[in-house]
Image (cartoon, helix red, strand yellow):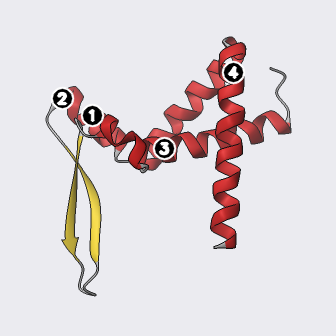
Amino acid sequence: MEWHWFSFALIALATFRLTRIIVFDKIASFLRAPFITIVEEKAETGETVSFFRPKGKGLRLWIGELLSCYWCTGIWCAAILFFGNEYINVIFYPITVILAISGLAGIIEHLLD
Protein backbone atom coordinates (compact mmCIF):
# COMPACT_ATOMS: atom_id res chain seq x y z
CA MET A 1 0.00 0.00 0.00
CA GLU A 2 1.40 3.37 -0.96
CA TRP A 3 1.22 5.68 2.06
CA HIS A 4 -0.25 9.12 1.46
CA TRP A 5 -3.03 11.18 3.03
CA PHE A 6 -5.80 8.84 1.84
CA SER A 7 -4.10 5.80 3.36
CA PHE A 8 -3.58 7.68 6.60
CA ALA A 9 -7.25 8.72 6.73
CA LEU A 10 -8.38 5.19 5.92
CA ILE A 11 -6.27 3.66 8.69
CA ALA A 12 -7.32 6.41 11.13
CA LEU A 13 -11.05 5.86 10.54
CA ALA A 14 -10.66 2.07 10.62
CA THR A 15 -8.68 2.31 13.87
CA PHE A 16 -11.39 4.51 15.38
CA ARG A 17 -14.09 2.00 14.49
CA LEU A 18 -12.18 -1.15 15.45
CA THR A 19 -11.24 0.36 18.80
CA ARG A 20 -14.86 1.29 19.53
CA ILE A 21 -16.00 -2.22 18.61
CA ILE A 22 -13.48 -3.81 20.97
CA VAL A 23 -13.83 -1.39 23.90
CA PHE A 24 -17.50 -0.37 23.85
CA ASP A 25 -19.77 -2.26 21.45
CA LYS A 26 -22.05 -5.00 22.71
CA ILE A 27 -21.04 -7.29 19.85
CA ALA A 28 -17.55 -7.67 21.36
CA SER A 29 -18.66 -8.05 24.99
CA PHE A 30 -17.73 -11.75 24.87
CA LEU A 31 -14.11 -10.69 24.23
CA ARG A 32 -14.08 -8.37 27.25
CA ALA A 33 -16.02 -10.63 29.66
CA PRO A 34 -13.09 -12.81 30.82
CA PHE A 35 -10.99 -9.72 31.55
CA ILE A 36 -13.37 -6.93 32.65
CA THR A 37 -16.26 -6.47 35.05
CA ILE A 38 -18.69 -3.64 34.39
CA VAL A 39 -19.38 -1.77 37.63
CA GLU A 40 -22.38 0.55 37.96
CA GLU A 41 -22.65 3.25 40.59
CA LYS A 42 -25.11 6.04 41.29
CA ALA A 43 -23.67 9.51 40.76
CA GLU A 44 -24.61 12.48 42.95
CA THR A 45 -26.96 13.58 40.17
CA GLY A 46 -28.87 10.29 40.47
CA GLU A 47 -27.64 8.99 37.12
CA THR A 48 -26.16 5.52 36.89
CA VAL A 49 -22.51 5.60 35.83
CA SER A 50 -20.82 2.52 34.39
CA PHE A 51 -17.10 1.87 34.32
CA PHE A 52 -14.75 -1.03 33.64
CA ARG A 53 -12.84 -2.85 36.36
CA PRO A 54 -10.10 -5.27 35.19
CA LYS A 55 -10.24 -8.82 36.61
CA GLY A 56 -7.55 -11.14 37.92
CA LYS A 57 -3.79 -10.88 38.11
CA GLY A 58 -0.84 -11.08 35.75
CA LEU A 59 -1.64 -11.42 32.06
CA ARG A 60 -5.41 -11.42 32.69
CA LEU A 61 -5.15 -8.13 34.59
CA TRP A 62 -2.90 -6.64 31.90
CA ILE A 63 -5.38 -7.55 29.15
CA GLY A 64 -8.23 -6.18 31.30
CA GLU A 65 -6.39 -2.89 31.74
CA LEU A 66 -5.69 -2.75 28.02
CA LEU A 67 -9.33 -3.40 27.09
CA SER A 68 -10.61 -0.84 29.59
CA CYS A 69 -8.47 1.92 28.09
CA TYR A 70 -9.64 3.36 24.76
CA TRP A 71 -6.23 4.93 24.09
CA CYS A 72 -4.30 1.73 24.87
CA THR A 73 -6.52 -0.46 22.71
CA GLY A 74 -6.39 2.16 19.96
CA ILE A 75 -2.61 1.99 19.63
CA TRP A 76 -2.73 -1.79 19.23
CA CYS A 77 -5.57 -1.57 16.71
CA ALA A 78 -3.61 1.03 14.74
CA ALA A 79 -0.50 -1.17 14.75
CA ILE A 80 -2.42 -4.26 13.64
CA LEU A 81 -4.18 -2.39 10.82
CA PHE A 82 -1.01 -0.61 9.71
CA PHE A 83 1.20 -3.70 9.59
CA GLY A 84 -1.62 -5.84 8.24
CA ASN A 85 -2.09 -3.42 5.36
CA GLU A 86 1.65 -3.20 4.85
CA TYR A 87 2.38 -6.94 4.76
CA ILE A 88 -0.94 -8.79 4.17
CA ASN A 89 -2.71 -6.17 2.09
CA VAL A 90 -4.96 -8.58 0.20
CA ILE A 91 -6.68 -9.56 3.49
CA PHE A 92 -6.42 -6.35 5.51
CA TYR A 93 -7.32 -3.75 2.89
CA PRO A 94 -10.98 -4.83 2.47
CA ILE A 95 -11.38 -5.08 6.25
CA THR A 96 -9.82 -1.64 6.68
CA VAL A 97 -12.10 -0.07 4.06
CA ILE A 98 -15.22 -1.58 5.66
CA LEU A 99 -14.16 -0.41 9.13
CA ALA A 100 -13.32 3.07 7.79
CA ILE A 101 -16.71 3.42 6.08
CA SER A 102 -18.42 2.26 9.26
CA GLY A 103 -16.36 4.68 11.35
CA LEU A 104 -17.18 7.61 9.09
CA ALA A 105 -20.87 6.67 9.13
CA GLY A 106 -20.75 6.65 12.94
CA ILE A 107 -19.14 10.08 13.03
CA ILE A 108 -21.73 11.48 10.59
CA GLU A 109 -24.56 9.96 12.64
CA HIS A 110 -23.16 11.51 15.82
CA LEU A 111 -22.89 14.93 14.16
CA LEU A 112 -26.46 14.76 12.85
CA ASP A 113 -27.92 13.46 16.12
Q: Residue at x 34, y 43 (%)?
A: 29
1, above or below 107, in the image: above
Label 4: which secondary element: helix
Q: Name the residue under label 1.
A: 62
Q: Residue at x 24, y 37 (%)?
A: 35
Q: Where is residue 1 in the image (x, y as percent from the top left)?
A: 80, 20
Identify the mark nearer the N-term, 1 or 4.
Answer: 1
**Left or right: residue 2 compared with residue 13:** right
Q: Name the residue under label 3.
A: 21
Q: For the residues marked 4 and 3, what is the alpha-carbon distance in whole angstroms?
A: 19 Å
**Left or right: residue 57 compared with residue 17:** left
Label 2: which secondary element: helix
Label 1: which secondary element: helix
Q: Mark 2 points at which residue?
A: 58
Q: Where is residue 108 in the image (x, y as percent from the top left)?
A: 71, 61
Three-letter amino acid code at disc 3?
Ile
Residue 85, quarter of picture: top right
Three-letter amino acid code at disc 2?
Gly
